Every structure is written in structure tokens, then in C-alpha cells.
Amino acid sequence: MEPYESKLLSMIEKNEKIVVLTAENRVSLRNIPEKLNQNFIDVGISEQNLIGIGAGLAKLGFLPIMHGMSAFLTMRAFEFIRTDLGYPSLPAVIVGTFNGLSATANGTANGPTHQAIEDIALMRLVPNMTVVAPSDVSETLEILDNISKLNGPLYIRDSNLGIIDIQREPFVWGKNECIIKGDDVAILSYGTILDVCLKVSKKLSQGSFPHSVYNMRFLKPVDKDILHEIFNKFKKIFVVEDHINMGALGSIIKEFAWENKKDNEIIFINLGESFFRPGNFNDALQNTELAAGKIYGKIINS
Amino acid sequence: MSNNFKEIDFNNFLLSCKKNVLKMAQNGGCFIGSAFSCIDILAYLYSNVFDVEKIKNMEKDRDILILSKGHAVAGLYAVLAQVGIISKDRLENYLTIKDDLYWHPNPNIPGIEFHTGSMGHGLSIGIGMAFASKLNKINNKIFVILGDGELNEGSVWESVLIANAYKLDNLVVIIDRNFRQANLKTEELIPLESLFDKFSAFGWEVMSCNGHDINDIRKIFNPSNLFYESDKPKVIIANTVRGNGIRLMEDNPKYWFGNFNEKELEKFHKILDKGERKK
């Protein structure tokens, strides 16, 4: 059994109000449906109903954890999320998989129908929504540990079921973290691409290029404390994300800079406005601006 | 469910509700045609079937009704006021920004569970609530009122499939079958017939009734009706008339929505009082 599955099982043992739902997406749930009995509901390929049904459960005191592919959840079911979860601020968890350049199960091979490269922008638009993009499964489990405190919906951009082997700060809900500490430039990222940035970081360290790497997992509400820290400490900030250039971390940074009258130099590395060419994860990644070598080049030549 | 309003004269009760709706059909107006289409059933459910006190107190095993065709909310607010779930004075606030009474149901109003109005949401929500009742081992029923025009929405049919898959026998859908959607007749735009056969083929227990005949309504919604014993999700196709009770409004697309002046209101009040014709 995978760590994510064991986590859900142990949570439901403690809290029978948790209901696991899916729109027939079982990638992260293969081994648990039989064990969850009636606390597991597979609604079939119907994302709108997944959210509507979750909303009905949430209204009557249950905590739904709803699974599906990010593209279909955040786009096809957007209005249900906005009106039936966001507007009444119902505690409910949406776990979207296959988003950005998702490394999980070679999620880059699907093509544009399945690409969720605008999901963070969409979910940030939903009132009362919390948006978080964990970089590995250990972080996803930390997030799940906190969901009983929710007072509104949560979107988890679940992109990487692997484990990044690195020392982290203790997880604090709503707070982002500095993973690599150094001077000169800050690299800000989250999710799948955080791992790529850590590879860039290794190369930078080999060349004795001082830098910091920040894990910006909480995208809504914005962790302003860490942004003040970053903008005060670094003249040059790189914002690296597997998302289009609108509505996600890049936009958060621009909004923050404008609101706080900051004139730091900011370099945005993302998917621009376009779909990425599908292929195996490494091939797909190499073909974007998010390839480790390209990020590295931009930083040392800046 | 209880029958705590058994003794009242249902016709008078319904008349008062309809007059409440007329009050909302001025100074900005309301969807009076839609309201008068389903108000007989709403009035009966809240006066004879539901336990009003439990709804007031938001008790865990309260009766639940989702008015998925949210634009008919003037009918529901009129009934909620008549049974005392909201105060009648509150209807005076209709369309003023100091309160939450407007063209679609707001969950800040007691008795309203969700903000409906966007077509095709209510049934999925009702399914979630039916699941919740089962998980809570509560033996209540979840009622969802759908408009027939609303059946154009694909999300409704996802719900119809899912309710059957999970044998949600505590789910009761009422289709307000007035054969009208916003602008046109349903059968002229997107034909729905045979609706009975469609739901039957989808695995539902189907019944139909005259949605304006109190005897028919009473028979259908009687908790001892064998219909409720079926292990399938249930649907009642309520044959109705948009704007029922005022001949000028009946099945008249001009009166889907009504925003009347004093003179018109007076005329319609008189018609309601004397009863233009027997249905």
C-alpha cells in the first residue's frame, strides 16, 4: 500500500466523517476502495457531480476528499466548485492529479486535453478557497494532517507521488519554506518543478553560486511574511512554475511587488501561454523553459 | 415526517401562499409563472409532510428539500413564511439589499440549504445529502425539485445514472412538468417525452401526478404510499401548468416572470380569491 493510501485509511479510522470520492480516477487509490466500504464513493466519469455530491455531504457534516484529474476538476466542474463549495465556504478537499508537468505516472504524455496548466489560476479565483501545491508525497500527507481545521474548500495540486530526499523545515499550515539558504538570488517554485529547481541548485552550488530555494506551496491565501522576507533580502528573484504565465505564482509575485512598491528584478520562467509538447516526462520537460539546464543558464547569465 | 398541519384547510393555506407570491411580483418582480407551477406541491410538503420544527432548528434528521429550479423561489419563500420557518414580515424585505430575499434561493434564509439557480446542480447536491443520510443512518427523504427545462442540462443525467448505481432509495425527485422552458415549449425545443420511460429505463421508480390536484398530491406524498418502499431512487413527474390558477398567466410565456402594477395586482388578487375556474 502507498503512503497516501495508508494515510487516508488511518484518517478514516479516526474520523468516520471523512468520505473519499473519485470521478473514476484511482491512480492514488488503487488499494483502498474495498477497505473504505461506504466511506468510498466512485461517481464514475462525472466531475460536476463529484463536486456537487461532495458539497451535499459537506453541508451535512462530512468531510469529502474528492479525487480526479486536475484538468477536468478545475475546468469542467469549475462552476460547481465556485458555487457549491466556494460560495458557502464548505470544508471539502479537492485532490487534483496530472497537472502542470506532472511527473506522476508520466502525466506529461497525455496531450492538451489532459494538461492542467491553468488550474492554480482557476482555483485562486474561487472565493474562500485555499490552494496548495505540494512538491512530494510527504508534503501531501502533512497537508492531509491539517484538513480537519478547514473552514472552506481546499485544492491540492497533487503532482508528484515520489519523495524528495531533502531536509525541510517543520510543516506549518499556510506557510511556505526556505529549503536552500544562500545569498544573491532567490529561486521560488512549488510542486513538480521544485524538484527540478533543487537539481539546478546542486549545479549552482557546485559552481559556488550563492542562492536560496523557496518552496512556495501555499498559493492562496498568499504567505505575505515570506514574500516580505524574500523581497527584502534578494535583489533578483526567479519565479519558476509549470503553469501558464497568468494567475499563479508569477501573478502573486507581481501583485505583491506592486502593492508593496518593490523594484526587485524578477525573472519569470513558466509555460508562457501555450500547451507543452506531450511526451515522456524528461523529453516533455526538456522541450520547455523549465528544463534544469535552461533554468541554470538563465540564472548564471542574469 | 409528520402530519402536524393535518387539520388546516389546505385550499386556504395554498391561497395565502399564492397571495404571498403576488406580493413579490411587484417592484422588481419574481418568476411567478414558475412559482405557481410548483407551489401546490411545496405547500403540501411543508404543511402536511415535513416536520417544520426540525427544519427551523436545523436538526440533523430534518426533512430536506432542494429547489433546484431556484428561480421558483418566490413560491418556496411564500410557503416558508406561511408555515413560520421565516416570518411573514421578512417577505416585505424582498429585493431590498438589507435582506437576502431575491430571485434565487439564498442559504442565509432558514429552510434553504444551498444557493440554487444555476440549472443542473441541485440533483447532485441532493445525491450527496442522500449519501450523508445513509452514512448517518438517518431514515429521512431528500426531495429535489427539478424543472423540466432543467433536464436539458447534462449534469442532471449524470446524477440520474449515479443515483441508480447506488440505489439511493431515500432520494425523491419531483419534476415540475409544465412543458415550458424559459422561452419555448419543451417539446418544440428539446423534446423530453417519454419522460416516464426515460427514468424507468434509467432504473428509477417513476410515478406521475397532477401537480395541482390536492387529492392526487395527497395520495402520492402519503408516507405510507408503497412507492416509497421501493429500493430504487424515486421520481414523481408532476404534471403542472405554468402560472396555474390565473387564466391569463397559464402556459403564457409572457408570465414566466411577473412584475405588476397596483391595478394588475388587485385584479390578480380578486381572481385568486374567487377562483377563476376549477382545475
Image (cartoon, helix red, strand yellow):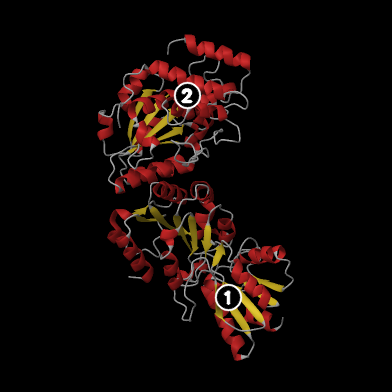
Q: Secondary structure at mark 2?
A: helix
Badge 1, how many Cα within 10 Å: few under 14, some, many 20+? many
In the rendering, at what x and y percent does residue A60 appear?
38, 46
Q: Is residue B143 visible?
A: no
Instruction: Answer with the quarter of the image where residue A120 lies.
Output: bottom right
Q: Is A80 situated above or below A255?
A: above
Badge 2, how many Cα within 10 Å: few under 14, some, many 20+? many
* A258 left or right, relative to B10: right
Figure quadrant of the C terminus of chain B: top left
Figure quadrant of the N terminus of chain B: top left
Instruction: Answer with the quarter of the image where residue A181 lies.
Output: bottom right
| In this rendering, the label closer to the viewer, 1 or 2 | 1
Q: Is residue B108 visible?
A: yes
Q: Amino acid at mark 1?
A: Tyr
Q: Is B149 situated above or below A227?
A: above
Q: Is B261 situated above or below A132?
A: above
Q: Amino acid at mark 2?
A: Ser
What residue is drawn where x is 29% and y is 62%?
Answer: A13
Q: Which residue is mark 2?
A: B37
Q: Nearer the viewer, residue B99 or A4?
A: B99
Q: Chain of mark 2?
A: B
Q: Secondary structure at mark 1?
A: strand
Residue A282 image label: none
**Distance between the alpha carbons at the discs numbered 1 and 2:** 59 Å
Q: Are the two marked residues, 1 and 2, in contact with CB atoms closer than 8 angstroms?
A: no
Q: Nearer the viewer, residue B52 or B273?
A: B52
Q: Which residue is mark 1?
A: A214
